[in-house]
Image (cartoon, rainbow, N blue to C red):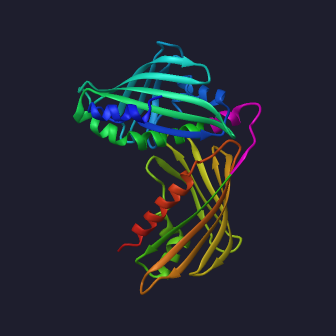
Amino acid sequence: MQTQTDDKDDAAAGKPAPTRLSRTLNAPRAVVFKAWSSAEHVKRWFAPQPYTVPDAKVELRVGGAFDVCMRSPAGETHWTRGFFSEVVQDSRLVIEMQVDGPAGGGIAMRARTEIDFSDAPGGTLLQVTQSYTVLDPAAAAPMLAGAPIGWGMTLDQLGRQVVEMQADAETVTRSVVHAMFDLERTYDAPVERVWKALTDEGAKQKWFGPPEGWALVDRYMDVRPGGRERAEGRWDSGLVTRFDATYLDVIVNQRLVYTYEMHMDGRKISVSLATMQLKAKGPGKTTLTVTEQGAFLDGYDDAGAREHGTGQLLDTLGASLID
C-alpha cells in the first residue's frame, strides 16, 4: 500500500491524493474475501446506497474481469470496468479500473484499487487504497470529490453482506459488539412542538420518514408505556429493514425511554436502549439530548454508522420544525 510520503509525491506531481479507508468487519477473512470473489456477491453490495448493481462480471484470477454497472434511482447506469492484477487468497487483491465519464464522453480516469485483508480482534481488518490517473479532469472532478463518501457507504454495504453470508452458512459466528453515544441538539422551537415531532406519527413521519431508495412497507406508532413503534421498508436492492421499538418510560414534554431492535431480512442485528430528554433553553428554544447504548449481534458491527445516522436524523428533525 502507498505511504504518506507517496501521497506527498503525488500531490507535488499534480496527481489526486489516494482515497484510503479501513473497516473492521466481524467475519473471518475467508468470508470477507469471498464477498469480492463472484458477481453474485458483488451485485449485493458494490455501490453506495441508494445505487444498485444490476449487472457485474467478476473472474477471480490475475487478468480476470472486474466489471460493475451501478444504477442510480433515476435509472442512469454507470460502468466501472477493470481486471485483477494481483490475487492472494484471503490476503490481498489489486484491481485496475477505468471509470467512464458521461454518456459518450469516454474514460474519465483510471483507478488502481488495493484491498488488503488481515486478522483483527473479532474479525477482519479491511484496508482499501485507491489511487488515480485522470484523463478527463472535468468529468473526473465530481467522482474524486465523492470517492471517500462513496467508498465509505459501499464498505457499509459490504459489512451487511458479510453478515448475510455468515447467516446463510451452516455455522453462524456468534458475537456481541457494544457501543454507546450521546448527541445533543438545540432547536428554535418550544418543548411542546419538539415533543409532538417525537411522539405524533404524522409529525414524526416528516423527519423519520423513508430515505431515498427505501420504500415504506409497514408503519405503526403508539407512544405510551408498553406501547410499540414499527417502521419497515425495502431498499431498491431488495434488502428489507425493520425498526421495532417498545416504549418503557413516557414523561410528557420531558423524557422518552425505549428499547428497539433492528432487523435485516428478518435477522436481528442489534438491540438498543435509547433515552431522549427535552429541556427548555430560553424563550422558544429546546435542547434535546439523546443517549443510546447498543449491542450489535453475530458479526454486525456498524463502526459508528448508527451514531452518524442518528445525528443526521436529528438534523432532519430540526429542519422539520421550521415553518
Which residues, given as a range, are shown in magenta? 162-177
Residue 90 in view, yes or no: yes
Q: Along the line of sight, which residue is nearer the eye, 132 or 41? A: 132
**Magenta stretch: includes residue 175:** yes
Residue 155 sits above or below residue 199 on the image: above
Residue at 55%, 24% in the rendered image: 92
Q: Along the line of sight, which residue is nearer the eye, 19 or 68? A: 19
Residue at 66%, 74% in the rendered image: 224
Give the residue furthest to the front: 5
Residue 91 sits above or below residue 196 on the image: above
Residue at 44%, 32% in the rendered image: 3
Q: Is residue 144 left or right of residue 153?
A: left
Give residue 5's position: percent from left, percent from top: 40, 33
Residue 124 sits above or below residue 110 on the image: below
Looking at the rendered image, the quarter that the C terminus falls into is: bottom left
Residue at 56%, 72% in the rendered image: 199
Count of number-bearing discs? 0
